[in-house]
Image (cartoon, rainbow, N blue to C red):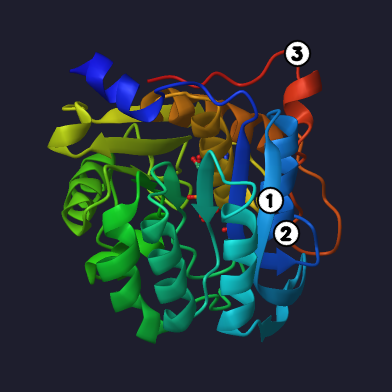
Amino acid sequence: MEDQVHQRLSPDPDPHPRVLTIAGSDSGGGAGIQADLKTCQELGVFGMTALTAVTAQNSLGVHAIYPLPVETVEAQLIAVLDDMGASAVKTGMLLDSAIVRIVAKTLEERHIRRLVIDPVLYAKDGSALFRREATDSLKAELLPIAEIVTPNIPEACELLEIQPDTIRTIADMVEAARSLLDFGPRYVLLKGGHLTGGTNGSSESDEAVDVLVGAPASGLHEPILLRSPRIATRHTHGTGCTLAAAIAALLAQGRDVPSAAREAKRFVTAAIQASVPHGRGIGSLWHAAHRHISEPLAVEE
Ligand SMILES: Nc1ncnc2c1ncn2[C@@H]1O[C@H](COP(=O)(O)OP(=O)(O)O)[C@@H](O)[C@H]1O
Ligand SMILES: Cc1ncc(COP(=O)(O)O)c(N)n1
C-alpha cells in the first residue's frame, strides 16, 4: 500500500520542480507570498505566484487589505499553469468566496494533484484575512481536491464549527484532525503552535506538536505526531505560511506527504530558532536558518 501511495505522488520526480503559491502579499516580508517564495528558494524549488490581495502589514499587524479583482487572480493562474505548469500548488490567504471558487475551478480543470491548502483565516494580530461568507466554498470546493490541508487550532475550530477552546490536548488535536478528513482532503496536518496546555501535563506548553492524519486511501492509518521543543520567542510571524510552503516544495521534489511534513517541520523549527526581531511587534522567521544552524532543535515523532 505504501508503495502505491508513493507512486501516486511521485510517478517521476520532476527534474525542474516548480511551486505555484496563490496567496496575499505581506509588505513586511515575513508571511504570505514573500514567506512562500523565500521558502521555495531555500529548498531549491522554483517559486511562482498568483496574488490574491495586497496587504499593508508590519510586525504590529495588518493595517490595510487591498483585494485584487477575481479576474486578475484567474489571469495569473491561467498564465502560469497553461505555460509553465506546476509540480505542486499551495494556497494561503484567499480572502473571499469568488477567489476560492475560481481557484478551485482552475486547479480542478487542470488536475492539480499536489495541492497544499493552508486555510488562512486570521493574521497573528487577529485581523481577518478571510471573509466568513467564504467558509462554505472553502469546505465544499477546495478541501475535497486537497492533497493536504494545514489548519492551526483556531482555524480547525472554525472549520469544524466548534468552540475555540475545544482543542486543548493532543488527543483533542487527533480527534479534530480526523474530523477534518470528512471534508475530503487526503491528509490533514493540524498545527499545534496555539496549543496552550502543557503536553506533559504542565500548565505551560513545553512543546510545539503537529498532528498528521490520513484518509483511509492514503495508507496512513495511525496519526504521526511531529514534536519539537517550544521556542521561547514572540517572533513567529509567518510560521504557518512557511510550513505549508515547505511541504509544497518538498512534494514538488517527489517526497511523499509524511516525509515532506517531517522535513518541513524541521525547516520551520530552524527558521523560528533564528527569527528576526524587526519592528516593534511580532518579528519574522529567518528562512535561511537551515543553512547555518549547526545544532537544530530535534524534531521527533
Ligand atoms: N514557539 C514555537 N516553537 C516551536 N515551533 C513553533 C512555535 N510556534 C509555532 N510553531 C510551529 O510552527 C508551525 C506553525 O504553527 P502555528 O503557529 O500553529 O500556525 P499558524 O502560523 O498558522 O498560526 C507549526 O509547525 C508549529 O508547531
Ligand atoms: C498576506 C498574509 N498571509 C498570511 C498571513 C498569516 O501569517 P502566519 O503564517 O503567521 O499565520 C499573513 N499574516 N499575511
Q: Which residue is mark 3?
A: 294
Please tell me how crowded label 1 is: few (under 14), some (14-19), or many (20+) other residues with Cα within 10 Å: many
Q: Position of residue 202 (x, y in %)?
A: 37, 38
Residue at image location 21% in from the left, 41% down from the top = 171
Residue at image location 63% in from the left, 51% down from the top = 83
Q: CA distance from mark 2 to mark 1?
A: 27 Å
SS class, disc 2: loop
Q: Which residue is mark 1?
A: 48
Q: Which residue is mark 2?
A: 282
Q: Amino acid at mark 2?
A: Ile
Q: CA distance from mark 3 to mark 2?
A: 25 Å
SS class, disc 3: loop
Exactly how many numbered labels are in the figure?
3
> Looking at the image, can residue 31 be seen?
no
Observer-side mark, 2 or 1, equals: 1
Q: Is residue 48 left or right of residue 244?
A: right
Marked residue nearer the N-terminal end (2 or 1): 1
Q: Quadrant of the C terminus?
A: top left
Marked residue nearer the N-terminal end (3 or 1): 1
Q: Quadrant of the N terminus?
A: top left
Res. 114 image quadrant: top left
